[in-house]
Image: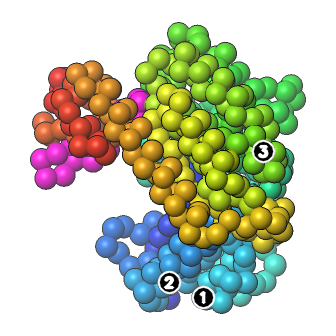
Amino acid sequence: MAGSSERERARVRLVALGCRVSRADSDALAAGLGAGLALARDGEAADLVVVNTCAVTADADAAARRAIRRAARENPRAQIVASGCGAATCPDALRALPAVVAPRAQGGIPALLDRLRARERADAPLADAPAWPPAAASPARHTRPFLKVQDGCDRRCAYCLVPAARGPSRSLPLDAVLSRLAALGARHPEVVLTGVHLGAWGHDLAPRRALSDLLRAAVARGGVRRLRLSSVEPEEAPIDALREPEVSAVVCGHLHLPVQSGSDRVLRAMGRPGGAEAFRRAVADAAEALPGACLGTDLIAGFPGETGRDHRETVALAASLPLAYLHVFPFSPRPGTVAAGLPGAVPAEAIRERVAELRALSDRLWRSFLAEQAERTLEVVVERVRDGVARGTARRYATIRWPARGELRGELAHVRITGDDGAECTGVRLDG
């Protein structure tokens, strides 16, 4: 294997599929590579490729297979390693590609890579590696790095494989969170807090804590200019903390509150807590606590037994709330879940039509949200400068582009919004 001698480090390429947790895991792996390993640079052939897979839908399974095949084509001399949720739930399918399936504990992957670099047996038993806490994220990989503060899930939603792939909920202790936030905040203007079930952070700690406690402590500690939350269950959104001006001044005006359906009947079949009215109240509370915030949700179309009326209730709920976007997924039966054995399968054509209708609604909501930003001055993290155009992400999640004026990647800019193209805003920088 090229680069496998003791004097030359093997090059590792990391591919993250799926959610922010997958990307956070890849960041942690980048920070924890052994002395004989180094990240491959752009355009450089890799000796080892780690594909962190997702298992949320059948499309995610297909994406994992495509990514592994592509990695093999682009790096013909490399060993391909599959990790993440897809590798945990469907290991045999990935080994057949072929790929080496990583241990479920992310902490064991560096040892596996060292073994592959040395051409040792990949299937020999590895010494136990701590699954938790993860290594600190590398501060050099993203302008808005992800910090995973929670992993696993104790819920049993009928459609979800994540508990089987990730295990029970566990939280990064508060002191460790604050230490890692300080390290990332010293290098980056924004840090994204993420977890498989982020709203459960702190429930397993002694003393028991809540996500609101984490936000208040992070703000009191200082050193982080912007905090963004990834997906939070509606009933677990830290609204009490976000109502406090000192907290809302730091936490970005962007909440993703997954509901999955607007039909109470379907929500019960899904095993989801609360109902449509509880979601309505959660969105209203979020909009009140964070005026003008970007609010989004997840929806599954075509869950077994979903009728046309159920679908219309979902559309009506989403259209009636101050949402900016919808992440819409066609139902995909996952072997091993309760939903895979439920009767009342919705015809594929009906699922496609329902997905299309919800995505069209999402497009309208997003266009309306972007139009509301006109003439506002937004604080933006510069993420890319290319061909005379700078791009970045605002506190309210919208992507902004403007004529570059010597911007540096990772700095903050204040941009007055002059228009939009339906996908992102355009503007003019006022400072710098």
Q: Are marks 1 and 2 in contact (CB under 8 Å)?
A: yes
Q: Amino acid at mark 3?
A: Arg
Picture coordinates of residue 251, whole percent (x, y) = 52, 24
Specify which label sits upstream in the sequence, 3 or 1: 1
The residue where tag 1 is placed is 97
Give the left or right position of residue 91, taking residue 392 as reference: right
**Residue 299 versus residue 378: which sits nearer the camera?**
299
What is the number of the mark on residue 253? none
**Residue 327 versus residue 47: which sits nearer the camera?**
327
Picture coordinates of residue 78, whole percent (x, y) = 50, 84
Q: Residue at x 50, y 67 (%)?
A: 15
Front tag of 3 and 1 = 3
Q: Amino acid at mark 1?
A: Leu
**Residue 284 versus residue 137: which sits nearer the camera?**
284
User: Do we see residue 103 in this rendering?
Assistant: no
The residue where tag 2 is placed is 69
